Image (cartoon, helix red, strand yellow):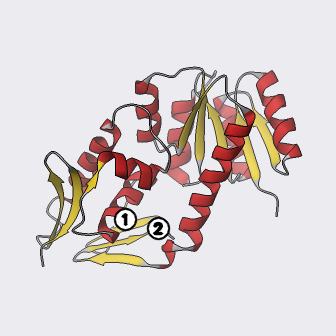
Amino acid sequence: METKLLIVDDDVNICDMLRLYFENEGYKVKTANDGMDGISYFKAFEPDLVLLDIMMPKKDGWQVCREIREVSAKPVIMITAKGEVFDKVLGLELGADDFIVKPFDMKELSARIKAVLRRYNAQCKGQDNEVVKFENMEISLQKYELKLCGKAIDIPPKELELLYFLASNYNRVFTRDQLLDKVWGFDYLGDSRTVDVHVKRLREKLEGISDKWVLKTVWGVGYKFESLS
């Protein structure tokens, strides 16, 4: 079955160039030139991966990424002319899987797409077979579902993946860079504030759920999921 790729960019020339290149690579490609069409095509086309520009009319890439993450965990790679750390941090916090800056090399972009799809498919077919359980908490990557005290909780995909990874490796300390590599899955250039933001949001969700485990800061090192029982 063909891998389906959705390209959302207001530059028609870039869309045409990417479409031709990736159709030659064997992908089934659809393009959109504004954020509104991007959302509509995402729902109708059901792509395996989205290449998403940031600066677009009607809805920018941030809003499109946010709306995709409300309904799907399918991979999103942000494509932009901007290269500031702030843009990368915001994109990661919204749930983007990777980030590439214009102008880019087509072979590098193709390699990034394949790497992101491999990670996503491995999660779906491999480690998702197991559900991680602790007192009053159940995490399933297969369903992208977090249950607290038996109730399903709304949670962004990257927060769930981070919690799943830490809980699967409980009592082991990971640095921020290690977490970015293991959870986000690529070499991140810039600071690691996005990990701190995700941990903060997880703690807000997990507060008061159990006294048998804790999401703990190891000062000067990083974070760990500690089992206290």
Q: Nearer the viewer, residue 29 or 176?
A: 176
Q: Using the numbered discs, state the Cα–Cα distance from disc 1 to disc 2 in whole angstroms.
A: 7 Å
| Tally of numbered discs | 2
Q: Which residue is mark 1?
A: 164
Tell me if residue 17 comes above or below residue 157 in the rendering.
above
Tell me if residue 89 comes above or below residue 76 in the rendering.
above
Q: Amino acid at mark 1?
A: Tyr
Residue 197, image x and y in percent? 29, 41
Left or right: where does residue 72 sit relative to residue 8? left
Q: Earlier in the sequence, mark 1 or mark 2?
A: 2
Residue 10, image x and y in percent? 71, 23
Would residue 73 be visible to someone looking at this image?
yes
Left or right: where does residue 216 sit relative to residue 110? left
User: Measuring 31% from the left and 69% from the top, which residue is drawn there?
Assistant: 169
Q: Secondary structure at mark 1?
A: helix
The answer to whether mark 1 and mark 2 are in CB contact below 8 A is yes
User: Measuring 85% from the left and 51% from the top, which residue is drawn there?
Assistant: 26
